Image (cartoon, rainbow, N blue to C red):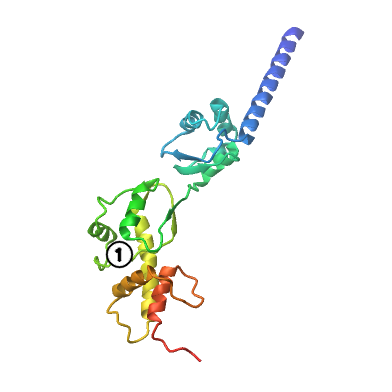
Amino acid sequence: MKKVLLIILLLLVVLGIAAGVGVWKVRHLADSKLLIKEETIFTLKPGTGRLALGEQLYADKIINRPRVFQWLLRIEPDLSHFKAGTYRFTPQMTVREMLKLLESGKEAQFPLRLVEGMRLSDYLKQLREAPYIKHTLSDDKYATVAQALELENPEWIEGWFWPDTWMYTANTTDVALLKRAHKKMVKAVDSAWEGRADGLPYKDKNQLVTMASIIEKKPPLPVNAIRLPRYLSTVYALVCACRPTQP
């Protein structure tokens, strides 16, 4: 009887040690750095489960212990609520930090720089070449773009996109980015047009934008303390040109 109790006791000790070692491995994996040497873009597809995630991370050489990874998700279930999306992993990131990022849903942001003075055709070329953008325009014809943006004045298209660095997430459509740039330009030009001086030789906003586009290719006009892109500063210089100087 004593021998049986001793064997049971030894088994419990062995199991306790094994459990302790297992927990240590899990904690060690959670606090260890990812295996990547540089920033890595990782896409988690909708419907991916815990097992599939572990296999994908292992196949992409981001982690090296897929079985221990599964135990981590069981021991710390709060880390298993991840969201589909495209994420940016860094070499300094731990496995736990990576899982918290997947749980947060904070996807990677990508820049698209629309440079002042470039034509819409140049912007469309940039969109075609930019990574992770969902292309929905059937072609780069201006009429196609005008129809996709549902412009009130389809012929008002060249020069009607705000030059800036626009940030986007994976699968953002080309039309969505163009709408953002167009909306901001419309708002700025509307503001300038409403505050214009009398007697300006422009029949409509498009003529004003066209002239601003022409002047943009020449040396910049002096505009006092207007912290805006030079393109829009030109618009403001045009609409304010006939205003009397305040004493």
Q: Is residue 5 above or below residue 180?
A: above
Q: Residue furthest front?
A: 219
Q: Is residue 175 visible?
A: no
Q: Is residue 58 above or below residue 12?
A: below
Q: Amino acid at mark 1?
A: Glu
Q: Is residue 165 left or right of residue 158?
A: right
Q: Is residue 156 visible?
A: yes
Percent x, y of residue 82? 50, 41
Q: Residue furthest bottom?
A: 247
Q: Is residue 145 above or below residue 93?
A: below
- The part of the image, by quadrant, that contains residue 201 is bottom left
User: Which residue has dot 1 on it?
Assistant: 158
Q: Is residue 122 left or right of residue 83?
A: left
Residue at image position (28%, 77%) is 204
Percent x, y of residue 77? 56, 37
Percent x, y of residue 218? 39, 70
Query: The N terminus is located in which quarter?
Result: top right
Q: Is residue 213 above or below residue 146?
A: below
Q: Secondary structure at mark 1?
A: loop
Q: Which of 157 and 20 lies nearest the eye of the viewer? A: 157
Q: Residues within 10 Å of mark 1 (few under 14, many from 20)?
A: some
Residue at image position (53%, 41%) is 39
Residue at image position (70%, 21%) is 17
